[in-house]
Amino acid sequence: MTIRLYDTATREVRDFVPLEEGKARVYVCGLTVQSEPHVGHVRSGVNFDVLQRWLRHRGYDVTFIRNVTDIDDKILAKSAAQGRAWFNLAYAMQRELTAAYAALNVEPPTYEPAATGHVPEMVELIGDLIEKGHAYAADDGSGDVYFDVRSWPAYGELTRQGVDDMEAAEDADPRGKRDPRDFALWKGWKADSEPATAAWPSPWGRGRPGWHIECSAMALKYLGSAFDIHGGGVDLRFPHHENEQAQSRAAGHPFASYWMHNAWITTAGEKMSKSLGNSLTIPAVLQRFRGIELRFYLVSAHYRSHVEFSFEALEEAAAGFRRIENFLHRALEVAADGPVDGTEREADFLPELERRFDEAMDDDLGTPAAIAVVFDAIRHGNKLLGEGDSVALRDVRRQVEAWLDVLGLHPDDPAWGTRGAGDTDERLTHVVDALVGTLLEQRAEARAGKDFATADAIRDRLKTAGVEIEDTPAGPKWSLA
RNA sequence: GGUGGGUUGGCCGAGAGGCGAGGCAACGGACUGCAAAUCCGUGUACACGGGUUCAAAUCCCGUACCCACCUCCA
């Protein structure tokens, strides 16, 4: 079985053949840490986390690098506007981002390099490009260095665009460029408007890196001259990825074999970055939904499909996810690990479901189809539940748990954490359990005497208090509404 | 102007020539004192107009609308 992935460069789903057998080297463009992360930002994190997990599941030794861009025009502009140091803003936002990823159970990458920590590598790479005749220092005294687009005939290959067909940016400052499409590798320090802390020494004078060069430098450093997969959001295809590829290849590196791009999340038909200030930041969404529910919502859609975000859709997804959790809880109660005292029947439908799940995931990470398989298994499992403990039920439960694990959606994954509740929470549960237990005894007496009015009144009162009662074959159960 | 993508039932969201993915909601049935949960069942969905084919949501041509990128962007 091979994993097949959609490669943006060739615009087709291709068998994944790593450069080195059994290893997968992946680079994903992380974020520019300039504002609080919103739902759109973390989609990329979640999507590529699924890729990472699936590759591992399939036995690959994965090296996964996801960078952080911690210096750029926007960071400088925003920090100046907020009256704080740029490095303070970047660091604060990076911490927010890390918290957001953690809240969504996005596994940390192998390493998370920051642009500011790799200036020497970038300077070296720019030097190579100048030497090879693909870059030049502007002669306007700005200290800028540009990539010479005309010197690289393959320019535009990733996004299939001809240089001459490109619209030159109207707002771009031509400065010392030979061609308006040339892009900055190095930006000279503007001593009058930029902080001295945002400038590093280089052969072309003090300055800071251009946006694209950092990813080339860091990918080459940690993954090598050639590596397997390069990922990011669709918007990065051009110019960012096109430029990354051009400058890396022009410097003599084969660079990435596969390019993967996740689609957008919009709200009200608009890109999130444009539309909303703060209602869709991760902390804001997490006040209304659990991280696991948000992750389920994101994973339910294919990574290359556009998603129109709405809280209604998120609520629906959460309702669906609770069906999964319900099954797991009940299955664990009925069929905990240990000797089976029920039937020894095997779950004969499982192999077929397993096959379908693997096939779905192998086919360009088909998470929607994979989740459909999980629901199919749960329907079977629920039927088994009605029959009590059995080998089959345990098999289904374990399989569902394994699937959820690989999707990063296992409710019991310690990564979801108790978020500070801990002890107090547990003690409160005991208290409530005892109090509710007393009322349930009264209700049981009333029911035994066919006094349903009293029984229902007790249930209603509990419900008003936020406790829901459910009668099961094993007796009444309570849960928080 | 160039490049890429989209339009699927009440809603979300898969699929990519034949067999109704899945979820949410709704309705009917089973179970229940009633609920809840669960199971069983219920839907003539593929933007529009042509065409190809024994067969089209899927392929081709055209039309409409939407979105993204073209040097700030997940």
Image: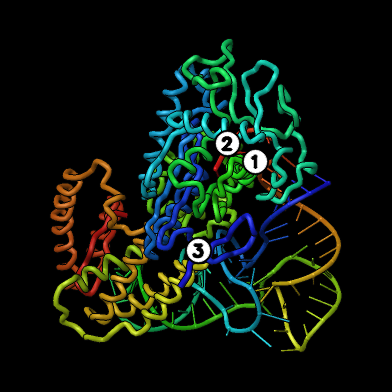
Point out the image quarter for the N terminus of chain A: bottom left
Of pointers 3 and 1, the one earlier in the residue sequence = 3
Determine the residue positioned at 26% across, 68% down. A330
Where B70 sits versus A209, above or below?
below
Q: Position of residue A183 (x, y in %)?
A: 66, 32
Determine the residue positioned at 33% across, 76% down. A381
Q: Position of residue A456 (x, y in %)?
A: 27, 63
Front of the two marks 3 and 1: 3
Give the amino acid type for the residue marked by disc 1 in the picture: Pro
Where A336 sits versus A271, above or below?
below
Q: Which mark is residue A212?
A: 2
Q: Can residue A270 be seen in the rendering of this structure?
A: no
Q: Position of residue A425 (x, y in %)?
A: 20, 46
Q: Residues within 10 Å of mark 3 (few under 14, many from 20)?
A: some
Q: Can residue A315 be seen in the rendering of this structure?
A: yes
Residue at which label 1 appears = A239
Given the image, what chain letter belongs to the residue carrying mark 1? A
Point out the image quarter for the C terminus of chain A: bottom left
Mark 3–mark 1 Cα distance, whole angstroms, equals 27 Å
Q: Secondary structure at mark 3?
A: loop
